[in-house]
Structures are given as C-alpha cells and as structure tokens.
Image: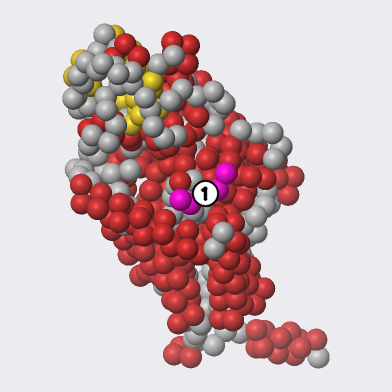
C-alpha cells in the first residue's frame, strides 16, 4: 500500500515530456521600490547590512554635495530666480517666464528662516541632488536589478556636471528628481498600476512641471504612451497632473495680480529668447553634453552606449520592454526640447538627459557581465572625482566675477561720489547687488550711452563695470581692475559668459564731449 502511494506520488509530480512542455515565461518586473526613501538599496540578504550600506551611501552623497556647495551664484538666471524669491515681479523678470512657481515657493519657505534668497535655492538644489539616489535606484532597478541600478545612480550623481551643478540655484536637478519619481510610480509594474500609484505619479509630475515647466511636453508624451498601452489608470493620473498644474499656475496668476502681467512678460521674453536662439553656435567640443561629461569624446561614447542600451532593452525577451519604451520616449522628448527650445551648448540643460540615459549606458555595459559593468562604472566615478575634487575648494569659497566686480564698483562709486555705468548684460546681477544695500549709487546703462538716450557722464565722476565681451561703449580708461574665473572646470560647466569682468575708473565713453553744464541723471 505504501509502495503504491509512493509510485502514484511520483506520477503526479512528473513533468510531461515532448511537445506539450510549456515555454518558460518571461521574468516579471521586480517589485517597485519606494522612490522617496528606501535605505535597502543593495538588496543584501541581511537587513542590517543592507540598511547600513544604504545609510553609508546616502551620507557619502550628502558629503559630496556639501563639498561642492557653491560660494556664489554664477549665472544671470540664478540672480533672476533669487530676485523672484525676494519679490516676485514678472514685469522686472523676477524671474523670467515660465516663472517656476513651486521653486519660488519652496525658496520663500527656506528664506523665511533667515536664509539669503539665492542660498535658499542652492540648499534646495543640493537637497534634491542628494535625495535623487532613491528615485534613481527605484526607477532603474526595474530594468537592471538593484545592484546595477545602484551603479547607474552613483555614476549619474558623480558625473562632473551632476556633481558641480548640484548646488546651483537652477531648477534642473530638483525637477529631474521629481520627474524620476513620477516615472517610478507609473512604471511600478509591467501590468497596469493601481489608482493610488497613478494619482501619486500625476501629483509628482505636476510638481516637476511647477518647478520646471519645460517638462510639461515630456510628461505629456510619457503619459500618452502609458495611457495608450493601458499601463496606468487614466483618470487618477490626469487628475493629479492637470489638477496640480492648474492649481499651481492659478496661484501664480494671483501672485502676479492677474493674467495680463504674465501674458505681457511671456510675449516679451519669448520674442527675445527665440530671436537669440539662432545665434547660439557650438561644435562637438562645446556641445552641452561634452561640457557635462568633461570631454567631447566621452559625449560621443555616452551617446553610443545609450543607443545600444535602448536597442538591447527593447529587444530583450525577459526585461520590461514597455517600461524601456516609455523611458526611451521620455529621453527623446527631453533631447528634442533641449535642441529646439533651449541652448544645447549649456551643460545645465543635460541634467535630465543624463539621468534618463544612465540606465541604458549600464544596460550596454551589462552585456559584458554584471561585475565588469560595476567595475567600469566605479572606474568612471573615480576618474570624475580626480577631475572635480581639486576644484571644489575654489568653487566653494570664491565669489563669482560679476558679483565681485559689481560690489567693488558700487563701493568705489559710493565712497567717491561717482556714477556707475553698467553693461546691460549684468542687469540681473545688478538687481541682486542693489537689493543688498539701501544707498546704491546712481546707475546708467551702456545702451543709454550708445543710443543717445543718456549723455555720457564725465570721466572723472564715472566708474564702469562690463563684461570683457561688451566693451564697445568705452574708448579708454585711467585704470582697469579685472575679475576673472581661473578655474577651467567652472568655465567649462558654465555658459561661457560673466567670467571675465572689468571695473574701469575715469572711463572715456563714446560720444563724450566737455560740457559746460553739470551732468544730471534723470529718472530712477
């Protein structure tokens, strides 16, 4: 009796042979990680070791961001954003369109604790750059597995551009972190996600747009693909995204005093912005991705690795191909936006591009094996560190040339009772410096002298501040003090402007003639 039971048990467990054998189903997508805070980043079997490794990793990232925290603002848009935190005024370009409403609100909250306006935005950017490890690992673990996803996240965070721009006052880092979080919510599983995740992704996407409205077409394209493939529930995702954006811009219009100031500022800025785009010229060496990575050949290599990784992911029979398609489409949308609407020579616009491509780079490297891919990523991070670390003390301690020059010139003009003549391209920095003191000297702009709307002031009562590229309004000067950025990395990762400033005393301006009457400034 026992023997017969054993035989029948074996019979029940026997796998059928021949044509009826079923093919192995593709591996399902791994469970989605929490994109907000999940210290179990590595997936070790021991919870204590995994959490301890996660804490150590996050601490390392935070320390790297503290080490690269800038001692100044370096770009005019940072000054505009800081002025928007101080006092929102779209007519004065404080800031310029599209106004970045959530970024200004967060900056105002930090500034309410007594933090300077620009510093409040820099703190926020450094925070989001540190926190980004969680959505990066959560997103890319769905395509690569946890350990390769950690390698991808660290590679991105320690690229030269990601590291040095982490503490800037710009919106790119924070908006990219929220964009990745939204995608993680929507791509939590290969099958359709729950309404909670759909709604959460929509809200996070709205937050990304309200920090950087340029991401709206990117998220719209991603959402259309997800809805077309029925991977998320439409109503919660649309409600979260559209509702959040509507509320944010409704609040913006209230703060601006109505739609008319916003429409007027948008029209003026758009005409200026798109008229300047054809003048943007660059080659491979000055391409934004080349600047971001530190070298043009690294940029070419990165693009080839990305394209190979996309093809490998889309052709994979075991990986989540639908998620790969969505991420590829999102990456393509960001690239098109940068190439058509922004200036592709500026490294800061490549933060989201690097974040959405780094996983595909690791996917290509994983074709050599997981261990080799990890070693190659670690080698790249080490090389980036050797490139960046020697410049961190300068970046952390130096004042940018425009702020240093304007402060020096304003002090000199105030003590010597002189008129300050300012290069028009420095207007945002001028507003920023003027907000620091109540007794700022009288100001005339270079264009007022060139177009005749203001007569040239007498040399003995003038001090001029100008970028080296904009000196055509000055004939000669008694003495010139130079303020230069000597760091090659800062020059490379910047926008190629406001790095060489001059302060001229007793300048002779174009059109100057001896006048019998005293010089009088009319207007504010």
- The residue positioned farthest toward the top in the image shown: 478
* Stretch of the chain drawn in magenta: 87-91
Give neighbour class at mark 1: few <14, some 14-19, many 20+ (Cα, 10 Å): many
* Pointer 1 residue: 89
Q: In the rendering, at what x and y percent does residue 131 appear?
A: 60, 46
Secondary structure under badge 1? loop
Q: Quadrant of the C terminus?
A: top left
Regarding residue 173, the answer to whether it shows in the image is no
Q: Position of residue 46 (x, y in %)?
A: 72, 48
Q: Is residue 73 above or below residue 198?
A: above
Give yes or no for residue 348 being in the magenta stretch: no
Q: Residue 326 appears at what percent x and percent y?
A: 43, 69
Which quadrant is the N terminus positioned in?
A: bottom right
Please name the residue shown 44% across and 47% down the image.
93
Q: Nearer the viewer, residue 7 or 283?
A: 283
Q: Residue at x 38, y 48 (%)?
A: 349
Task: Residue 315: give x, y in percent of width and height.
Answer: 35, 70
Q: Main secondary structure of the magenta part?
A: loop
Q: Residue at x 60, y 76 (%)?
A: 239
Q: Residue at x 64, y 77 (%)?
A: 195
Q: Based on the displayed image, in which of its 4 quarters is residue 473 positioned? A: top left
Residue 191 occupies which quadrant of the picture? bottom right
Q: Nearer the viewer, residue 304 or 178?
A: 178
138 vs 106, nearest the viewer: 106
């Amino acid at each position: 009796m026992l023997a017969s039971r054993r035989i029948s048990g074996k019979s029940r467990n026997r796998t059928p042979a021949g044509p009826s054998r079923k093919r192995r189903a593709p591996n399902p997508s791994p469970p989605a990680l929490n994109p907000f805070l999940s210290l179990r980043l590595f997936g070790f079997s021991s919870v204590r070791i995994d959490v301890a490794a996660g804490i150590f990793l996050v601490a390392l990232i935070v320390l790297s961001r503290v080490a690269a925290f800038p001692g100044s603002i370096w770009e005019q848009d940072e000054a505009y954003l800081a002025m928007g935190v101080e006092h929102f005024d779209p007519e004065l370009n404080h800031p310029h369109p599209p106004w970045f409403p959530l970024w200004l609100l967060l900056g105002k909250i930090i500034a309410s604790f007594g933090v300077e306006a620009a510093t409040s935005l820099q703190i926020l950017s450094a925070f989001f750059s540190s926190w980004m490890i969680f959505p990066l690992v959560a997103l890319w673990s769905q395509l690569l597995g946890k350990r390769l996803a950690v390698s991808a996240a660290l590679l991105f965070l320690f690229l030269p551009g990601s590291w040095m721009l982490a503490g800037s006052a710009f919106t790119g880092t924070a908006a990219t972190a929220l964009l990745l979080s939204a995608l993680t919510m929507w791509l939590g599983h290969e099958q359709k996600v729950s309404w909670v995740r759909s709604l959460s992704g929509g809200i996070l996407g709205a937050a990304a747009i309200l920090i950087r409205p340029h991401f709206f077409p990117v998220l719209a394209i991603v959402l259309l693909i997800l809805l077309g493939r029925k991977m998320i529930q439409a109503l919660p995702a649309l409600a979260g995204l559209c509702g959040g954006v509507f509320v944010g811009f409704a609040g913006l219009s209230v703060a601006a005093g109505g739609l008319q100031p916003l429409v007027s500022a948008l029209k003026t800025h758009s005409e200026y912005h798109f008229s300047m785009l054809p003048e943007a010229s660059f080659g491979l060496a000055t391409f934004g991705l080349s600047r971001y990575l530190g070298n043009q050949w690294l940029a070419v290599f990165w693009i080839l690795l990305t394209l190979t990784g996309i093809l490998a992911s889309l052709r994979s029979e075991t990986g989540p191909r639908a998620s790969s398609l969505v991420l590829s489409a999102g990456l393509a949308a960001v690239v098109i936006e940068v190439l058509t609407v922004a200036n592709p020579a500026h490294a800061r616009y490549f933060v989201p591009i690097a974040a959405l491509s780094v996983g595909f780079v690791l996917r290509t490297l994983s074709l050599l094996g997981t261990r080799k891919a990890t070693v190659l990523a670690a080698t790249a991070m080490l090389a980036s560190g050797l490139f960046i670390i020697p410049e961190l003390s300068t970046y952390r301690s130096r004042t940018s040339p425009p702020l240093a020059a304007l402060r020096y010139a304003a002090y000199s003009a105030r003590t010597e009772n002189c008129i300050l003549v300012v290069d028009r391209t420095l207007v945002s920095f001028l507003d920023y410096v003027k907000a620091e003191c109540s007794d700022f000297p009288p100001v005339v702009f270079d264009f007022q002298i060139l177009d005749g709307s203001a007569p040239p002031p007498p040399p003995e009562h003038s001090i001029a501040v100008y970028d080296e590229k904009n000196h055509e309004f000055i004939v000669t000067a008694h003495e010139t003090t130079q303020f230069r950025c000597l760091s090659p990395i800062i020059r490379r990762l910047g926008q190629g402007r406001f790095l060489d400033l001059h302060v001229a005393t007793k300048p002779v301006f174009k059109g100057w003639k001896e006048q019998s009457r005293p010089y009088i400034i009319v207007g504010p």
